Structures are given as structure tokens and as C-alpha cells.
Image: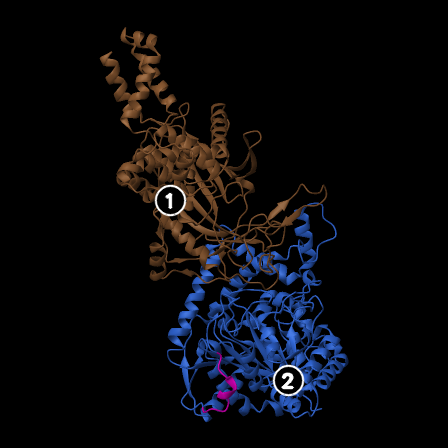
Chain colours: A brown, B blue
Amino acid sequence: MENLVRGWEVIIGLEVHAQIATKSKLFSSSPTAYGSDPNTQVSFYDAAMPGMLPVLNENAIDQAVKSGFGIKGTINKISRFDRKNYFYPDLPSGYQISQLYYPIVTDGYIDIELLDGTVKRINIERIHVEQDAGKSIHDLSPEFSYIDLNRSGVPLMEIVSKPDMRSPYEAMQYVKKLRNILKYVGSSDCNMERGNLRVDANISIHKPGEPFGNRAEIKNINSIRFLGQALEYEIERQIIAKETGEEIVQETRLFDSNTGETRSMRSKEDAADYRYFPDPDLKPVILSDERIERLRAEMPELPDEKKQRFMSEYGLRANDADVLIDDKEVADCFEKAVNASKFEPSETAKLIANWMISELFAILNKENKTIDTIGFPIEYLAELVDLIVDKTISGKIAKTVFAEMVSSGHKPVDIVQELGLVQIQDEGVIRKVVEEVLSKNPAQVEQYKSGKTQLFGFFVGQSMKSMQGKGNPETINKLLQDLLSKM
Amino acid sequence: MKNYLTISEAKKCLMSREFSAYELMQHYLNRIKNYSKLNAYVTLDEEKALASAKHADERIAKGESLPLLGVPLAVKDLFCTKGIRTTACSKILSEFVPEYESTVTQNLLNNGAVFIGKTNMDEFAMGSSNITSCFGPCFLPYRKKSKPDIELVPGGSSGGSATAVASDLCVAAIGSDTGGSIRQPAAFSGLVGIKPTYGLCSRWGMVAFASSLDQAGPLTKTVEDAAIMLKAMAGYDQKDSTSEKVAIPDYTAFLGQSVKGMKIGIAREYLEGLNEENLALLEKAKSWLIDAGCEIVDISLKTTSYALPAYHIIAPAEASSNLARYDGVRYTKRAKNFSNIDELYVNSRSEGFGEEVKRRILTGTYVLSAGYYDAYYTRALKIQKMIKDDFRNNAFSKVDLILCPTTPNTAFGIEESANMSPVDMYLNDVYTVNANIAGLPAISVPAGLSKDGLPMGVQLIGNRFAEAEIFKVSHVIEKSANFAELRKEIITI
């Protein structure tokens, strides 16, 4: 059996909490903007003042439905909100409104790619919509805790997988893929630094053939890297425990990103009884066929489909397609550039992909920019590639033009004109240069003729140099070969 | 100034400048002082009340005309009133002053009403005698012939509103009804009280007891007043997701219309165990309706007796959750002594809630707990559905309205009530909870006096949104009973 860790099979299931991208909260009109001063985005409802009532933000429901399409799930035409009751100072009403009994989406899946290239299906049990709680701040005063209710009532989707993952790698791949889908759908911006995507991981180990072990739930992991670390740590901890005869107890654990360790938060015995029951302040959510179809029609192309299309339509390799579709904006830019080119995609698409993946990404990384802050329109990249394809400039010169384009933001055509970088195509001119190079370097010519053929590159370089790199490399090669063979 | 002014009388006098809204307000404020021992009001802001009356006078002078312009009303302390303390008669909210106005009270203000003050009630509307208020009990202004020394309860939970109207400390009042809290005090106090169809009045800004059952409604001296006031209170509110998008007709237009051919059902289950006085009253009401041309139809509603137990699962379950927000963290009264967050919760809630509220929170928490949820809560919901189906299939497919008693008995003594077991107390709601459980409109109309000289009411239950029919038929009962004359026989204090 694969994936065993020292003879143990690992079972992982994830609950991902994604903040739904809406302007206002799930049940009030307070804004959801990030980074506002504490308690400035709080309505009477959010503070659970007496007699205040929830009014559902229908947009949040639309986004959840689209997310459901994104994971190929079943959209439930009737769903319902329940109250999850518990006391906590940053939960003003004493209950969180969630969907326990009738979630809006059930039975979806995501296909992830494993290291060996095979595809594995991770099943998703449900997506339900719920409110976020506020924030308790304990470190501002030795005496008091402070409460910020800005997040109170912010809409979340909880996306619950089946326990289908067998390694930290699979778990990380799953979250990456899920994040990508939600970003494509536009239902969440999935900004993990802002806490817009948080993961609870359930993990247990057992010997193959034996029943599943007791699971630990690691709460509130806020990065994919931490998810990997937390799971790795937890696997070690559980194996050591089991191998030293210790019982794994079902419990909730916290991951400490400073130490890379998880520690026990509360055991099952302390677990609260949340006394879920249908929220009497809200009617069931009933989705009409029209609404479902309208949302279906609004669905963008999803990452998997886009990848397939990039491969079949533009002849991209799987790896390159993967890199481009990883970020929807990058994928869109790629297509924009391909469309802007004056040549057929069959001639330019692969080149554009290469330029984006190597040169453009290098600049983005170096300058810590994103594709929309790069400083020139993506159509310029198409123009640059067009200049290569029509042989106005060589690939080498193109790098100079690209660098100039990045620093000045000028059009490639203008840069080529300004800097006089147009490729020398005239065979007569090139022949003169090549002849001169050969006649200036008789010693090297002798060595070449006596068998040191690697000197061919030297002649190419010298010729290029005297043409400031603008000579057509193919012509240079052809002429050199021609002349040297006759010498 | 004429005593026991109705809304329509007050309106007429105000518009004809017989007296000003200011004078009327002053008149009530004086009476309230004289009758302070009744403990009908828990919060009065005389200055504010007089100022709003004065403002109403200015509007009247300008020729404005609104259905309730200048009419002084009392508001049950369950409704949030902007800038005026709102406590639900609980110690835990004793320092709460809302920054907002409930939709129902705002609707009344928009119709020109002026508010006198906030009335006493059972804590968080939990009770049938107004003895659970943190401000102490409110008293019925009437006495039994046989035992005139015994202080009686006004019923509950809207006891303060009932007493304020019955002892003429306001023209009319707002109440709320979760299991009978408008109708039972109305019956005890010789008033008209209607619980509208669930969703007719917005719950926004009304302190929640049991969200799926709570409805606001008027407590008035006449059916006409109830019709005027309900029209002013009701209406769709986008801030309440359970509010219904229905047009609110002018209910007064239905008063005096012929009821000929209307079918009135009497369910035999409501007659079982009914005392003689109640039976006799029902017979009387029946004959009045027959005289008016109604057809009386014998029906059977087999689920009737299940409503009370279902109610005492659903209502506390919702209450246990609704009252979780009163935790001592924000606007509620915080205990002085605590050393950690759990103690803050426990001490604030232990000190802040009264016994009956604690009992219901415990009951509600229990019935929602893991292992008991299906046995209690799920079953109660099933029963609720059965009851709804029963009304639909076995009542309203055959009849327009159901006639039944409002309460099993007349007003009882305060001392007696203090010694009653909770379950005996809960039996007060036995004829009223069905309408709440099924979300149906129901009215209590004063129809007679007991041998002991206390008011008795009869109840009409209608199909959803049958308020107009209810007013039409109750108007017939009101006229036939001639309760205005009977009222003079009551021993008042």
C-alpha cells in the first residue's frame, strides 16, 4: 500500500472556512472591509442588541451556489439556517447562525494531481453558509480583554471534505486547488494572510486493515505551508504515541506556527453541546430554478477546464498550462496577449507562454509585483513576440527590449526604433562582417580546421558582437558554415 | 373630561378641540399618579410625554390628520423605544436604553400616536399573572364580589398594558402575545385583545421571547379601537424576515357589516372540562351569532390538547437561545463579583434573571440538548405541524371562524398565583396557545361577567390573515354583550 508512514495509514479530512466576497455582512448591512478600526463596522444587529433581527444577504447565497458549481456539487433548492449555541464574549448573540441540518451544497469533489502525475478525487461532503464571530484581543491589557465586532456576522462558507486525503501533500494540494476554484468563481478572495481562508484539519492514523483511529482536530490553520507542517507534526506525534502504547484521544488541538507543534486545546469530554436548532428568525432558503440557472450561466471557466483548453487550443504542455492557470489573472493575461498578437496562436501562443513563465514571472518575483501592477499592458508582450516571429529582432535582442519595456513602459516597437535594435537581415552586410571576423582571427581558424570545432561559437559571438547583437543568427550560422568549409 | 375614552372618541374630541392632546396627556399622567398602587407603568418620562403631546397639538393646529394623532397610548416594556429605558421587566436589562425604535411603535408614532410610558409585564413576557416582573406585580383594578379584599392579577404577560387600559390610565395599549399574553389579560380585564396572524406585525425591536410565536397586538376598550390600532401597527417590514407581504385593509370598514351566512365552528375539544360559567357564556355567544345570521357548525380538532405541551417545548427552546445575549458582557447588567469569564456569565445571569425565566431557560436548554432533541424538540415540531394541518383540514375547510373560551377561569388572586405550581400557571394558556402554535389570528372579546362580578371573554380564532372577519364577528359579540353596561357592575378600586 502506498503512502504508509512507517506502516501507518494516515487519514485526513479538512474543513475549510472561506470568507464569502460580499460588501456587507451575512445578516446585516454593515460593511466587511478589511483593516477598519475596531468596532466601526458594527450594526445594532451585529452587537446582538435586544429585538434586532437577521436579514439574509442574498448575494452571499448566490456566491455559495456558484462555489457549489465550482466543486461540481449538488445545489440544494431548500436549505435552512440553524443556531449553534455557545457562550463566548466575541459571539454577542450567544449563538452562531450556520447550516447544520440542511446545507446549501452537498456532494461535490475536487480532483487533485499527485506527485506521480496521477489524478485523485477528493470528495466534498458539503458547503454551508455561516456567520463569523468577532475577535477577542487579550494582549492589550493585563487586566481586560477587548472585543472587536467588525468580523461579527461576516459571511463564511464552510467547505467540508470527506476523509479522503492520505498525506499532508494531498491535503495541501486540495486546499491549493480549492482556493484556486473559489478565486476563479469569485466567491472568495481566499486571502490567507487576512484570515479569509482558514483550515481545520482532522487527522488520524491506523494500521492498514484496521478501523480508523481516534482523530485530532487541528483548528484555525491559516496557511497552506502551516497546514503541511501541522499535519507532519501530528503524524509523528500520533505514531510515537501509538508505538509507545499511548492512546490517541479525540481532541481539538492548536497549531503553533512558531514552534511548528500542535498542542491540546480541549478533549471530547469538554466539547460543548451546541444545541443546534432551526433559527426561527429566518425562513428557509428556497432557490428557484431560474435563480440556479442564472447563476450557472454566470459561471466562469474553471481551472481544470481552462487547463485542458490551453493544452488543446494553444498546444501548451501540461506543466506550462498549470503554471498559467494557477492564477486566473495570469491566465486571462495570457489569452489577452495571444489574442493581441497579429499572428495565429499556433505561431505565438507557446512563445507567449514561455515569455510569461520565464521572463515576466522573474520580473514579477524580483520586483514583488503582480501581473496587474507590472507597468505595461500585456499587449506589449504580444507585440514583442510578434517582433521575434517576424524576425524584426532576435530572441536575444528581445530580452533587451523586454528589460527596457519593464523599466520605461514604452512600446516594444518604439524601443526597437529608438535603440536601433532592428535585426540585420541583409546577407551582404552580414557576409562582410563574418569575413572580417575570420580574417582577423587566423589562429582560431587554423585550430578550427584542425578539428577544434567548438570554436564555431566563438566566430558566431564575434560576428554578433560586431553587429551589436543585431545580426540574424541563422544567417550568421549559415554564412560561417559556408565560409569555413571553403577555407 | 369623559372617562374611559376610546380611540375614536379621543380622536373626535382632539380634532374638535374639545381638549388638547397636552391636556389629555396631563389627565392621564395625573390619573397614573393617583393609581400608582396598581403598578401599571414601570417607566414614565412625563416631560417627553407632554412634549410629544404638545407637538401633536401643533400638528392638529396645522390641520394635519392622522389616525392616532395626539392619542396617548401605553407601550408594553417589551418594545424598544428610542431613548426610553426598555427592560422587559427584567433586572438584567434594568439599565438598557435603546438607541432605536421598534417597528411597531414607530408605525404608531408615524400614525400620530403619543406615548405615555412603558407598562409592567411578566419578565421577558414569561408568565400569566404579571407576578414575575422585577418591578413587582401589577394589579387588576377589579375585585371579586365575594371577596372584595383580595388583590387580583391582571393576567399576563401584558398585565401592565391591560391594567393601564382597564383603569383608564391611557386610551389603549400595545401588548405582545406568545401563548396568550394579550388575550388572557384582555379577558381578565374586560378588554378587547387581538393576537394577529404570525408575520402581520413586525417583530423588529421587540425583545424576543419565542421568535416563532411572538406577535405584537393591541389591548383596547372596544373592537373598533383594536381595528384602528392594528391597522396602524401592522404591515410588512423588510427588517423582519418573518414579516408577511400582505396589504393591511381598513379593518374598521368591516365593522357593522352583515355576518349573515358566516360559519362559526365550535370545536367539541374546547368544551371538555369547561366550567359552567364558561359553557353558559359560550352558549350566549352562540345565540347572539345565530341571531345575527351566522351558522354554528360543530367541529372536532383532535390535536387541541397537544398544543400546550408542544408550546412548553418550542417556546422555552427558542427563549433559551434568544436570552443568551443577556450575558453581562455588553449592555446588560454585569455582576460585580467575578474572577473569570465563566463567573461573569454565571453571576450576571444568576443575579439578573428571575425564577420563571431561569426555569424556562433550563427547560429550553434541556429539550435542545444532545440525546433529548429528537425526543422533545423534533416531536414538538411534528405536533406543531399536526396542529396546523388539523386547523386547515378540520376547521377552516368548513368554517370561517372558531368560537371558544379565552381562559379557563376569571382573574385569580395574587397570593393564589404565588402559590400556584408552574404547571397550574401554564394551564392558563390552554385555550390561547393553539393560535400561537398554528400562527393564526385570535381575539378575545369581553362577553360577560362571572357570578363573582369579574369580566369574562370569548375567543374567536381565524384562518391566516382573517383579521377582518374576526373584527366583523367580534363586533357583533361586543354589541350583543353590551359589555359597556356590564362594566358598570364591576367592583373597581
* Residue A375 horizontal side relative to residue A485, left or right: right
Q: Magenta segment range? A: B248-258
**Chain name for mark 1:** A
The residue nearer to you, when weighing A295 against A10, is: A295
**Place of residue A471 in the rendered image (x, y in percent of width and height, measured from the top left):** 33, 26
Graded by Cα atoms within 10 Å as few (under 14), some (14 to 19) or many (20 or more), the crowding at tag 2 reads some
Residue labelled with disc 1:
A332
Q: Residue furthest top?
A: A450
Q: Tell me if label 2 and label 1 are in contact, CB under 8 Å.
A: no
Tell me the CA gap for discs 2 and 1: 86 Å
* Residue B348 horizontal side relative to residue A174, left or right: right
Q: Residue furthest left?
A: A486
The residue nearer to you, when weighing A355 against A52, is: A355
| Residue located at (39% from left, 28% from top) | A207
Secondary structure category for the residue under label 1: helix
Give the label, 2 or 1, closer to the camera: 1
Residue labelled with disc 2:
B452
**Place of residue B88 in the rendered image (x, y in percent of width and height, measured from the top left):** 65, 66
* Residue B222 horizontal side relative to residue B94, left or right: left
Q: Is residue B383 magenta?
A: no
**Place of residue B300 in the rendered image (x, y in percent of width and height, measured from the top left):** 41, 76
* Quadrant position of the C terminus of chain B in the picture: bottom right
Graded by Cα atoms within 10 Å as few (under 14), some (14 to 19) or many (20 or more), the crowding at tag 1 reads some
| Residue located at (36% from left, 27% from top) | A470
**Chain name for mark 2:** B
Quarter assignment of residue A289: bottom left
Secondary structure category for the residue under label 2: loop
Q: Amino acid at mark 1?
A: Asp
Q: Mark 2 and mark 1, same subunit? A: no
State whether residue A414 appears in this view: yes
User: Compared to A409, does B182 lie above or below?
Assistant: below
Q: Amino acid at mark 2?
A: Asp
